[in-house]
Image (spheres, helix red, strand yellow):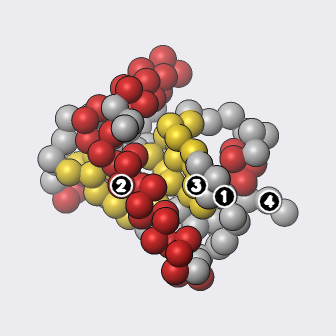
Amino acid sequence: MASIFTKIINGEIPSYKIAEDENFYAFLDVFPVAKGHTLVVPKKEIDYIFDMDDNLLAGLHVFSKKIAKALEKAIPCKRIGTAVVGLEVPHAHLHLIPINNIADISFEHPKLKLSETEFKEILEKIKANLE
C-alpha cells in the first residue's frame, strides 16, 4: 500500500508543493511545529532514510539545501534546523524547520493551526526565494 507521501507526490492528496524534480518532492507540513515547516521526501518509497542508496541520500540533502536557502529568506529565523525521525510515516523524509533556538525544533510542542490563506502566503514566500 502506498504511503501518504506517495499519495501526495502522485497528486491523490493535495499538498502545498514548494518544488520537485525527478527524484524529490518538497511540501509544507500541514501539522507544522513552526511556520514554514517543510518536508522533503524522495519520490521512491523507501521506509528508512539509511536504507537509501548513497547517491539518493546525497541527492536528498542537495535538493533540501535549495529549499532550506529559500525557506531561510522567506521566514525570519537564525537557522533552518533539520530532523529525521522516521517513525510517523513509513517513507523516508527530512524535516526543514525555521528555528531561533533549540526548543523550536521540538516535536512535543503543540502543532500550529494555520489557515489555508496562511499556508498559501508562506508557500508563495518560499517559492519566490527559490533559485
Question: Which mark is in front, 2 or 4?
Answer: 2
Q: Secondary structure at mark 2?
A: helix
Residue indicated by mark 3: 24
Coordinates of residue 67 in the picture (x, y in percent): 40, 46
**Is there a contact, CB below 8 Å, between mark 2 and mark 4?**
no
Residue drawn at (72%, 54%) of the image: 6
Residue drawn at (55%, 71%) of the image: 56
Check the picture and name the quadrant holding the C terminus. top left
Against 120, residue 67 (above or below) is: below
Coordinates of residue 48 in the picture (x, y in percent): 59, 76
Residue indicated by mark 4: 2
Residue indicated by mark 1: 43
Q: Label 2 to label 1, Cα distance in Å? A: 17 Å
Check the picture and name the quadrant holding the N terminus. bottom right
Amino acid on which disc 4 is placed: Ala
Residue drawn at (58%, 67%) of the image: 92
Closest to the observer, 33 or 74: 74
Q: Label 4 to label 3, Cα distance in Å? A: 16 Å
Question: Which mark is in front, 4 or 3?
Answer: 3
Dot 3 alpha-carbon crowd within 10 angstroms: few under 14, some 14 to 19, many 20 or more: some
> Furthest-right residue in view?
1
Closest to the observer, 131 or 99: 131
Amino acid on which disc 2 is placed: Lys
Q: Label 3 to label 1, Cα distance in Å? A: 5 Å
**Is there a contact, CB below 8 Å, between mark 3 and mark 1?**
yes
Q: Label 1 to label 4, Cα distance in Å? A: 11 Å
For the question of whether residue 57 can be seen, the reply is yes
For the question of whether residue 110 can be seen, the reply is no
